[in-house]
Amino acid sequence: MKNETLNLEFSPDVLAALKIGIDELGQEIKLLAAIYYFQEKRLSLGKAAELARINRLEFMDILSKKGIVLFDYDESALAVELKGIEKLGPDDCK
């Protein structure tokens, strides 16, 4: 699948104020968008990591450091997940 391109313009003053280059700003914008859409439940963890162009573990680490909840279950959903885990045998955990 072909990637889409988005062009954004920034004045040199903005980049100077941020003390970063255009490539770093682009990466930060992707990461911030990924975090936002993940928190809004518009992207899964995997898709958000893909948007940020990092692997899932790196994305999870960033979320954790920012105090962002990775797994937001209500009580009934958590109960269903726990019942599923209880049914797993030793061979299912390999």
Image (spheres, rainbow, N blue to C red):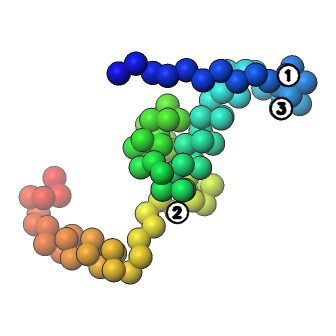
Q: Is residue 61 visible?
A: no
Give residue 18's mark: 3
User: Does residue 42 appear to the left or right of 9 in the view shown?
Assistant: left
Query: Is 27 placed left or right of 40 in the picture?
Result: right
Residue plotted at (54% across, 49% down): 37
Q: Which residue is mark 1?
A: 11
Q: Secondary structure at mark 1?
A: loop
Q: Quadrant of the N terminus?
A: top left
Residue drawn where x is 40% and y is 43% of the image: 46
| Relative image position of residue 2 (x, y in whole percent) | 40, 18
Q: Earlier in the sequence, mark 2 or mark 3?
A: 3
Q: Closer to us: mark 3 or mark 1? A: 1
In the depicted view, which residue is nearer to us: 69 or 39? Answer: 39
- State the image coordinates of residue 55 (x, y, percent, origin top left): 43, 37
Indicate whether 8 appears above or below 45. above
Q: Please tell me whether mark 3 sits on a helix, a strand or a loop.
A: helix
